Image (cartoon, helix red, strand yellow):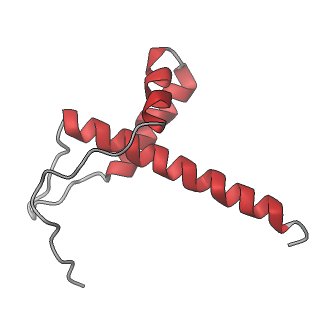
Amino acid sequence: MTAPGRIARLFGLLCIALAWMTRIGAQQTEINAPRRDNRGRAVVSVTRIGWQILSQAARWGGDVFWDCLRLLGMPFPTASRSPSQSVRC
């Protein structure tokens, strides 16, 4: 740990990437609801969906990447669903 400034910048970049993937996944789940298992939970997380879309857009480019880039500057949609459920261990 000789350069804590570099680690701070890397951590900041990773936080931005995580928020970007989550934003893309949230947009996609508004359009197409994810599959649910028997308990009613999503089979794939919102962040994983965003990661899949963003990785394909970064590899193959095109208009999809620019759409994803526009989403980075937009706020998350408001939650119009029922209140969140408690989690049991």
Spot occupied by residue 39 in the image (x, y as percentages of width and height): 10, 65
Q: How many marks are shown on the rendered structure?
A: 0
Measuring from the top left, give residue 54's x and y in whole percent: 47, 34
Left or right: 9 as drawn, with respect to 63: right
Image vertical order of residue 84 relative to residue 64, above or below: below
Q: Position of residue 53 (x, y in %)?
A: 41, 34
Q: Nearer the viewer, residue 45 or 13?
A: 13
Residue 24: percent from left, percent from top = 38, 39
Q: Residue furthest top?
A: 62
Image quarter (top left, top right, bottom left or bottom right) of the C terminus: bottom left
Quadrant in which residue 15 is drawn: bottom right
Check the picture and name the quadrant holding the N terminus: bottom right
Q: Is residue 85 left or right of residue 56?
A: left
25 relative position to 30: left or right: right
For the point 82% across and 63% down, the residue is 5
Judge whether 52 appears above or below 56 on screen: below
78 to 70, vertically: above or below: below
The residue positioned 49% from the left and 24% from the top of the image is 65
Task: Please give the name of the residue rendered at 21% of the width and 78% of the height, measured from the top-left corner.
Answer: 87
- Residue lying farthest to the right in this orientation: 2
Q: Quadrant of residue 50?
A: top left
